[in-house]
């Protein structure tokens, strides 16, 4: 069977609900580990094994857009909830993520009706870098000194166990 590009395979699978072989070979109608994927696997996230074993480089002159995950008062986000996420919290809230893995990102927004004490607490293995200063292991940041509804902080894990503040509004300080 003639090999086709990944994008075409995904678009055909979405449009017609059928399986097509990936450019790196395989076949088998969406059976895990065979190199092909069905629409169902795309939508339910059950793509497994060597179906995911290839590196893909994408070059575009167009736009690639991904949605931001919106969380509602999630105080212990899971690993999968820490990629491109906005957590809108109300009340005095402590958000405690899992250990940082390079590439994770989360923004936390004080979305309450009044200003609340919002804390980004980290596991003992992690550090938060705020304004160029690396905090001690296990010491998060807080905006308890802030006074504005709508305060937020955005953090990106730039390496394992390293959260770096990339943007904020309000007064944020080490705990």
Image (spheres, grey):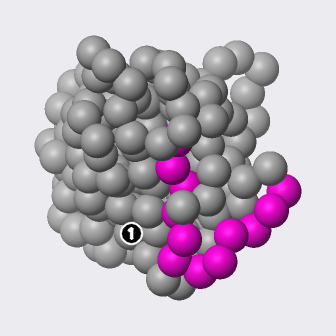
Q: Position of residue 9 (x, y in %)?
A: 41, 38
76 shown above or below 114: below
The answer to whether 119 is drawn above or below residue 147 in the figure is below
Furthest-right residue in this view: 132
Mark 1, other Cα within 10 Å: few <14 / some 14–19 / many ≥20: some
Whether residue 99 is visible to the viewer of this picture, yes or no, is no
Please state which of residues 155 and 144 is positioned toward the viewer in this rendering: 144
| Res. 50 image quadrant | bottom left
Q: Quadrant of residue 11?
A: top left
Residue 150, visible in the rendered structure: yes
**Does 97 sit above or below residue 50?**
above
Q: Is residue 140 magenta?
A: yes
Residue at x-position 80% and y-position 50%:
131
Residue 40 falls within the magenta-colored stretch: no
Instruction: Please provide percent x and percent y for residue 76.
Output: 27, 59
Q: Quadrant of the C terminus?
A: bottom right
Q: Position of residue 150 (x, y in %)?
A: 46, 19
Q: Which residue is the site of mark 1? A: 98
The spot of residue 157 in percent (x, y) is: 62, 60
- Secondary structure beneath dot 1 equals loop
The magenta segment: 132-143
Task: Write the residue at 30% across / 46% down.
Answer: 93
Question: Residue drawn 28% across and 67% down?
Answer: 48
Question: With respect to residue 171, does 93 lie above or below?
Answer: below
């Amino acid at each position: 069977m003639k090999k086709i590009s990944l994008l075409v395979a995904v678009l055909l699978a979405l449009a017609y609900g059928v399986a097509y072989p990936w450019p790196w070979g395989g076949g088998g109608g969406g059976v895990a580990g065979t190199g092909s994927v069905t629409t169902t696997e795309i939508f339910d996230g059950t793509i497994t094994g060597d179906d995911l074993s290839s590196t893909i480089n994408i070059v575009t002159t167009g736009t690639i857009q991904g949605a931001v995950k919106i969380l509602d008062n999630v105080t212990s986000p899971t690993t999968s909830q820490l990629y491109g996420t906005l957590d809108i919290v109300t009340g005095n809230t402590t958000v405690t993520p899992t250990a940082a893995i390079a590439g994770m990102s989360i923004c936390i927004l004080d979305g309450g009706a009044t200003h609340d004490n919002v804390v980004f607490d980290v596991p003992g293995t992690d550090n938060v870098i705020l304004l160029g200063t690396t905090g001690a292991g296990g010491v998060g940041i807080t905006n308890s000194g802030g006074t504005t509804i709508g305060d937020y902080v955005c953090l990106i894990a730039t390496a394992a166990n390293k959260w770096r503040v990339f943007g904020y509004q309000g007064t944020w300080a080490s705990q």
